[in-house]
Image (cartoon, helix red, strand yellow):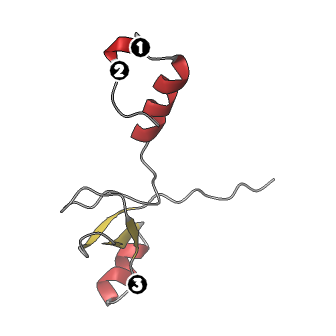
Amino acid sequence: MKMAHDPEKGAPEDDELVEEVEELVIDPDHPPCPRCGWHNTRLSHTKTMVDTVLKAFSVRAFRCRSCGNRFRTVRRVKKARTA
């Protein structure tokens, strides 16, 4: 995928604009690391009683795979619909 707009080719095509917008969508399963800003994060193991209590309020611990920073953030989980 092309990252920069080439002025010799003219205006970008609609498909290229859609791809650029799709890149900006944030994945709620991978929040950005507050230290380095990367989205290469994963859920961290529950280590303490504080983690267990916060988990009840949808505050989960994450670990950045890029810099190793452990941080907490709200993780909204979709509730299953019942018929």
Instruction: Find residue 26 and report its horizontal and vertical position in percent.
Output: 42, 46
- Dot 3 alpha-carbon crowd within 10 angstroms: few under 14, some 14 to 19, many 20 or more: few
**Residue with the mark numbered 2:** 6
Picture quarter containing residue 4? top left
Give the residue type that dot 2 points to.
Answer: Asp
Q: Which mark is residue 45?
A: 3
Instruction: Confirm or deny contact between disc 2 and disc 3 (CB under 8 A).
Output: no
Q: Helix, strand, or loop for circle 2?
A: loop
Report whether 32 appears left or right of 36: right
Q: Which mark is residue 44?
A: none
Task: Tell me the distance, in whole angstroms, between the alpha carbons under discs 2 and 3.
Answer: 45 Å
Determine the residue positioned at 46% across, 24% down. 17
Q: Earlier in the sequence, mark 2 or mark 3?
A: 2
- Dot 2 alpha-carbon crowd within 10 angstroms: few under 14, some 14 to 19, many 20 or more: few
**Residue with the mark numbered 1:** 9
Instruction: Find residue 65 and report its horizontal and vertical position in percent.
Output: 33, 72
Instruction: Find residue 49 and report its horizontal and vertical position in percent.
Output: 33, 89
Give the residue type that dot 3 points to.
Answer: His
Instruction: Find residue 57 and report its horizontal and vertical position in percent.
Output: 40, 68
